[in-house]
Amino acid sequence: MNMNLKATKNAVAAFLRRFHVTLFVLVVFGGLAVVVFMLNSVIIRSSDTSGYTPETPNATFDQATIDRIEELQTRDQSGGALQLPPGRTNPFVE
């Protein structure tokens, strides 16, 4: 039995010594093929929107704040309440 185990070990070692480059190339190309197929399936699944329903945002706005912003915009455009130091101009008002 000892002799048979040693012969098997030598046969496997000789096989690996002879075909190690071929085995390496097969493993690398096989791994790359698996990765490409997995990425392809991810891309196909991500473009399928049949069961997707987008969420509607539940946003509410404070009307008083909106009114103040609009008031500031009209005052800034008319040159009213915004006081700048002498020699400076407001870059946001045309």
Image (tube, rainbow, N blue to C red):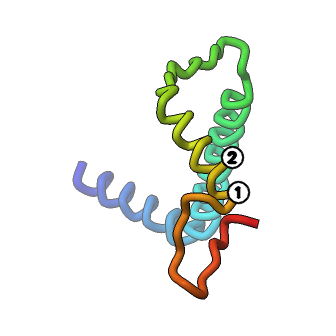
Marked residue nearer the N-terminal end (2 or 1): 2
The residue beneath circle 2 is 36
Question: Which numbered circle lies on residue 48?
Answer: none
Q: Residue shown at 50%/65% (left/top)?
A: 16
Q: Nearer the viewer, residue 10 or 74?
A: 74
List the single residue furthest toward the bottom: 87
Callout 1, which amino acid? Ser
Residue ID at (64%, 53%): 32
Which marked residue is nearer to the observer: mark 2 or mark 1? Answer: 1
Where is residue 58 drawn, in percent x and y?
Answer: 51, 19
Q: Is residue 3 left or right of residue 43?
A: left
Q: Is residue 65 above or below residue 9?
A: above
At x 23%, y 54%, the residue is 2
In the image, 63 versus 72, the foreground residue is 72
Identified at 24% across, 48% down, the residue is 1
SS at mark 1?
helix
- Label 1, on which residue? 78
Looking at the rendered structure, the number of numbered marks drawn on it comes to: 2
Depth check: give the residue in front, 69 or 11: 69
Q: Quadrant of residue 79?
A: bottom right
Type of the residue with mark 2: Val
Mark 1 residue crowding within 10 angstroms, few (<14) / some (14–19) / many (20+): few
47 sits left or right of 42 in the view = right
Residue 76 position, x and y percent, is 63, 57
Q: Residue furthest left?
A: 2
Name the one closer to the observer, 28 or 36: 36
**Real-space Cα separation, disc 2 to disc 1, in angstroms:** 61 Å
Q: Position of residue 63 (x, y in %)?
A: 52, 26
> Which type of secondary structure does the marked residue at label 2 adopt?
helix
Residue at the farthest front position = 80
Classify the position of the C terminus by image quarter. Answer: bottom right
Q: Quadrant of residue 91?
A: bottom right
